Image (cartoon, rainbow, N blue to C red):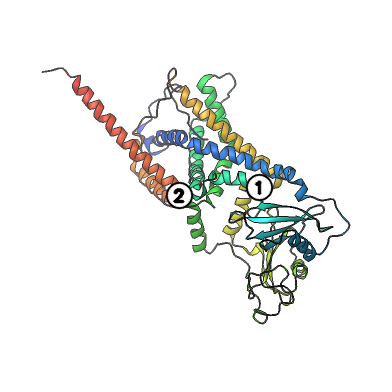
Amino acid sequence: MTTAPSTTTDEAPQPATPAPARNGWAPLRPLILRLHFYAGVLVAPFLLVAAVTGLLYAASFQAEKIVYAHELTVPVGERKLPIGEQVAAARKAHPEGTVSAVRPSPEPGATTRVMLSGVPGVDEGHTMAVFVDPYTAQVRGALEQYGSTGALPLRTWIDEFHRDLHLGESGRLYSELAASWLWVISAGGLVLWFSRRRALRTIRGTKGRRRTLGLHGSVGVWAATGFVFLSATGLTWSAYAGANIDELRTSLGHATPSVSAAASGEHSGHGAAAGQAGDASHGVGLDKVLAAARAERLTDPVEIVPPADADSAYVVKQVGRGWPTKQDAVAVDPASGQVTDVLRFADHPVLAKLTRWGIDLHTGVLFGLANQILLMALTLSLILLIVWGYRMWWQRGRGSAFGRPIPRGAWQHVPPQILVPLLAGVAVLGYFLPLFGIPLAVFLAVDIVLGEIAHRRGRRASGAGAPAR
């Protein structure tokens, strides 16, 4: 559950908890309630932006197929032309830049993409994709492309808006903050809900804040697992937490491996039958390279990357992110056309596989349309929970006033044998997730200062009201 949480103010007073129970759940509930409330109120605006932009991104895959249908699809012909001929047609129409990769038509009626880097006017890190009819070699158009999923301008714009609000690296802090706190708010709300057995209560017949609470909790219970997943996978490629995760994976020997692009020793540096090193026509050419990859069972969709220099090989890699995942890769000697290295996705370390699947599920490509519909349902749930959370905050107030805050001092009632390990765990999390730890530390510091100010004002007020002796 997210945003402003539930409280127990409109429930019947609970009987006093016996002393032995203080070692259990009872002392922790007020602390989690306060954290859930304030984290929800303060982080909700960031979560709302992430949810709205995430909803747009999940829908962008289908929108992309409609908007760019002319570039992406062609009438099915009798026979596909050689890849080299298709690339030559693309280069004739667009001689600018250099060929950085080629994605042959993956299915009947789909165009071939020839990616050009170093094209004037194209953003850094992006390429110009030239779309070629594989049956006629007619160029259907050219569009700027970004990322390993081949996002075109519409999806790229939404993706960057979701990731960094088009503010660059500094803008990524917003999405990392949202991802760092989403799982905390969701887990806290889940614990609060089941601690009162609210999941067994009905919403029908209730009204006011109790009804809002029922809607907020019921939807949150069903969506909480999805929120924790989105939070965890979103952190894997965030700026700071992502770097820590990568470092941890590397230290455990679970970094994502890559195929060796070095040409074989006897052929490196010479033997180019055609073209120049770094060109798509270098050595044996694209068609023989693709045939060598097919012999190693690399099925569509694939991407062919030309040699970077005279000592490098062609790299052919599968780029299928759906299920089952196709991520095998081979290196092909440009002089002999022989495969020099093979890397199978099945041989990737476990954490590398889980990272790949997690990111693909998060971005909506692992299970295609079903995956995208699920993401849209989750983001809509998050938007509703935020609205209901703020409504509950308003309903806790009186008249036009905002809701009352949760009382301070809950941590003082937590037994040391629970509090000390809890603080240690929070400190470790704060180290690995800086945008969880730093805001939490700031909140605690501000809360302590405000509490001390309120305490001193109360003492002065009580002193001023005391009768003179």
Outermost residue, left side: 469
Q: Residues within 10 Å of mark 1 (few under 14, many from 20)?
A: some
Q: Position of residue 384 (x, y in %)?
A: 57, 31
Q: In the displayed structure, does residue 413 sit left or right of residue 372?
A: left
Q: In the displayed structure, does residue 51 sit left or right of residue 153?
A: left
Q: Is residue 158 above or below residue 313?
A: above
Residue drawn at (36%, 34%) of the image: 410
Question: Which amino acid lies under the numbered mark 1 shown in the image of this protein?
Answer: Pro
Residue 322 appears in the figure = no
Observer-nearest residue: 139 or 250? 139
Dot 2 corresponds to which residue? Answer: 433
Observer-nearest residue: 348 or 137? 137
Observer-nearest residue: 248 or 106? 106
Observer-nearest residue: 14 or 59? 59
Question: Which amino acid lies under the numbered mark 2 shown in the image of this protein?
Answer: Leu
Q: Position of residue 427 (x, y in %)?
A: 39, 49
Q: Nearer the viewer, mark 2 or mark 1?
A: 1
User: Which image quadrant is residue 77 in?
Assistant: bottom right
Local secondary structure at mark 2? loop
Residue drawn at (55%, 19%) of the image: 206
Q: In the displayed structure, does residue 204 sit left or right of residue 65?
A: left
Q: Position of residue 46 (x, y in %)?
A: 50, 38
Q: Is residue 70 above or below residue 11?
A: below
Dot 1 corresponds to which residue? Answer: 153
Q: Position of residue 115 (x, y in %)?
A: 69, 59
Which part of the image, by quadrant, shows the C terminus? top left
Instruction: Give the CA distance from mark 2 to mark 1.
Output: 32 Å
